[in-house]
């Protein structure tokens, strides 16, 4: 695989990281965009690949993904085309663990 130049553009908002002529990451007041220069969330990761992200610990032991709200529910919501399909997490109203549909 041929190496491509990595260019970092700063000095104005947003800061861009570009590989070749393609913008790969944006950091600005709207958030961090990976695969997008217009993040809609504080961290917005977009790609056409089926496997969008991986969290991997390579030296053995536990690997954690932490969801830590200040009040409210701690949950993961699965969507299809913007519609909630499933949710899994802790209901803060009664401290129960729930899996819900829709």
Image (cartoon, rainbow, N blue to C red):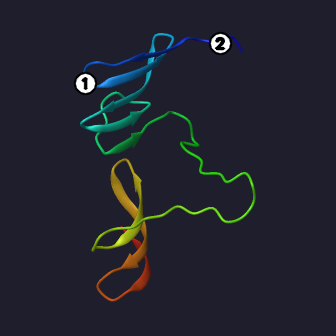
Split into 4 quadrants, where in the image is the C terminus?
Answer: bottom left
Identified at 33% across, 24% down, the residue is 15
Query: For the residue labelled by badge 2, is the local secondary structure a helix, a strand or a loop?
Result: loop
Residue at the spot of label 1? 13
Examine the rendered structure and indicate whether residue 82 appears above or below residue 95.
Answer: above
Q: Nearer the viewer, residue 30 or 101?
A: 30
Label number found at residue 45: none
The total number of labels drawn is: 2
* 2 and 1 marks in contact (CB < 8 Å): no
Mark 1 Cα-neighbour bin, 10 Å: few <14, some 14–19, many ≥20: few
Q: Nearer the viewer, mark 2 or mark 1?
A: 1
Towards the viewer: 91 or 79: 91
Label drawn at residue 3? 2
Q: Is residue 70 above or below residue 17?
A: below
Tell which circle, 2 or 1, labels the residue nearer the N-terminal end. Answer: 2
At a point 72% along the width and 15% down the height, the residue shown is 1
The picture quadrant where one finds residue 76 is bottom left
Q: Position of residue 35 (x, y in %)?
A: 44, 30
């Amino acid at each position: 695989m041929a190496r491509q130049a990595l260019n970092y553009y700063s000095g104005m908002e947003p800061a861009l990281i570009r590989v070749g002529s393609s913008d790969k990451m944006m950091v600005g007041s709207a958030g961090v965009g990976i695969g997008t220069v217009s993040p809609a969330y504080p961290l917005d990761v977009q790609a056409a690949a089926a496997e969008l992200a991986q969290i991997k610990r390579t030296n053995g032991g536990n690997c954690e993904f932490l969801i830590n709200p200040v009040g409210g529910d701690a949950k993961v919501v699965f969507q299809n085309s913007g519609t909630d399909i499933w949710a899994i997490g802790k209901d803060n109203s009664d401290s129960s663990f729930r899996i819900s549909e829709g």
